[in-house]
Amino acid sequence: MNHSCRYDILGFTKDLGLNLEDVHNLYNELINEINFALAELKIFIAKNDITNISKIIHNVKGVTGNYRLIDIYEETTKINDALKSNNYNSLKSDLNNLINICYLAVKEIQNYFSQRPVNKQHMT
């Protein structure tokens, strides 16, 4: 685990065998995807559109699991399970919590890369 980041970006980099610049680009794409998903999610929350909320949660769960964003993955798993069992009691608060977790994750990932030179360094 990285000392300045709760996400295992260095391990992710080593496992993929990529340089930090390439991984930085991948995480930038991930951040764009998360931001787009959150914008859509807010619209579907306002419309109480459970079908599209479920689709977004499923997609975010998959991508964040691949990128080792464990806190987001765990929250989306919890929400996904509740949606599958038609348990909507705490859905709105769970979704708001997910949105907050995502915003914090994005800031932390951006901060991680802003503190490191990412020009074709190969992580070994």
Image (cartoon, grey):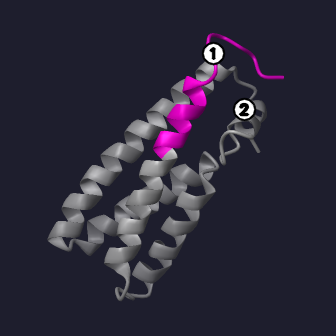
Q: How many labels does the image show?
A: 2
Q: In which quarter of the image is the N terminus?
A: top right
For label 2, the residue is 16
Q: Which residue is drawn at 78% across and 31% down?
A: 14
Please tell me whether residue 47 is drawn above or below residue 1 in the rendered image. Answer: below
Q: Residue at x 77, y 22 (%)?
A: 123
Q: How far apart are marks 1 and 2 (CA)?
A: 19 Å
Residue 40 position in % (x across, y down): 25, 54
Q: Which residue is drawn at 66% across and 46% down?
A: 7
- Circle 2 sits in a helix, a strand or a loop, which is it? helix
Left or right, 57 with respect to 65, comes to left
Residue 84 position in % (x across, y down): 43, 81
Residue 17 position in % (x across, y down): 76, 26
Identify the mark at residue 5; answer none if there is no mark: none
Q: Report the span colored magenta.
A: 106-124
Left or right, 43 with respect to 2, comes to left
User: Contact (CB < 8 A) between labels 1 and 2?
Assistant: no
For label 1, the residue is 117
